[in-house]
Image (cartoon, grey):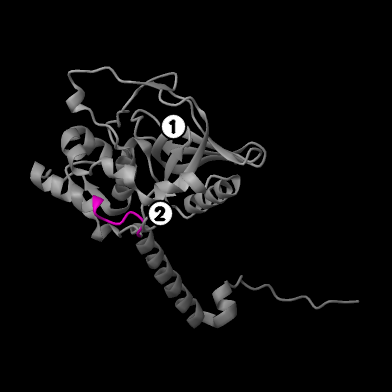
Amino acid sequence: MCFRKEKPSRPRFAFDVMFGTWGKSVGVWWLGAFAAVSFARADGTASEFRFDRDTFAFANQTVFEYHEGHASLRKSSPTKQDAYNRHCFVMSRTALQFKKFARFEPRSTPLDDASLATRIRAVTRQAAWTEPLPANQRIVFPGYKDLKEMSKAHRQLVQLSIGHGWPSYFRISNARMMFQDGTGYQERTHAQLNAALARGELFVAFLTTYPRFSINHSVLIYKLKSSSPNPGDHYLVYDPNHAESPRELAWSAHDRAFSYQKDWDFVGGFVRVYRVYGKPLQ
């Protein structure tokens, strides 16, 4: 059997094959338009959360003193009036809001204190569960490269402007810890956490061991650190009590439960996790 030998020809691009020269021109235009839209979307989406940039330079102070994670009454101190405590919910929420609604311009002239406080309050009044603002609609903070630098330079002003801590004790969604405490609810929370991080969202969490109160705290979960089917998932956490470095939250597939890293203010181990600020009244 014989085959006719074809005359060699130059390679043809996909657009030539489908539509000829006209199709190739249209295709190139379409790809350019698609790229422009993609870049526009990327410009309006928050970049990856970074602990060294997107957290506060100061820490939330605990109401009690802790020794190896066990609480005791704090001794009186002459600096007690300067204490900044009960603000873990406020700080977690505000870090989320700055990431979604603020923009920093380090080469511009800094604002005076009154104007700076006004802009900080404008950020905290944004509904935390709404979509991030595009860059050209964000609240601008000139003179600083990020939240870490600004909160270091204006610690007291920032503390006074982001909100009071006491309302967090009266949050309606806190009641979930009394009747939504089973492993099934925690499994759903674990699935919601992974889904939120996969979408590029941040996840503010309420950690509790109710009816014990070894922890009653709020943190911001910002990254899946590692995952494997046997031991479970490990997450990086911004904990307002620890301005120096990230903490770690873990999910055990075997125990169907979360656990939180041991430190001076928590004995470590089992915690229940509830999402907050993910939607209205949450």
User: Taking 263 as reference, is 103 left or right?
Assistant: left
> Mainly helix, strand or loop, the magenta region?
loop
| Of residues 10 and 246, the one drawn nearer to the viewer in this rendering | 246
Which circle's residue, 1 or 2, is located before the other in the chain?
A: 1
User: Taking 178 as reference, is 60 left or right?
Assistant: left
User: Taking 100 as reference, is 15 left or right?
Assistant: right
Seen at 23% across and 18% down, the residue is 76
Q: Position of residue 138 (x, y in %)?
A: 25, 56
| Of residues 273 and 20, the one drawn nearer to the viewer in this rendering | 273
Q: Judge depth for marks 1 and 2 and give the one in front.
A: 1
Mark yes or no: residue 38 visible. yes
Is residue 126 inside the magenta stretch? yes
User: Taking 68 as reference, is 88 left or right?
Assistant: left
Determine which residue is flagged by label 1. 213
Mark yes or no: residue 146 visible. no
**Contact check, label 1 and label 2, Cβ < 8 Å:** no
Seen at 56% across and 51% down, the residue is 188
Q: Position of residue 143 (x, y in %)?
A: 16, 42
Q: Secondary structure at mark 2?
A: loop
The residue stretch that appears in magenta? 124-130
**Within 10 angstroms of label 2, few (less than 14), some, or many (20 or more) residues?**
some
Seen at 30% across and 40% down, the residue is 91
Res. 278 mark: 2
Quarter occupied by residue 160: top left
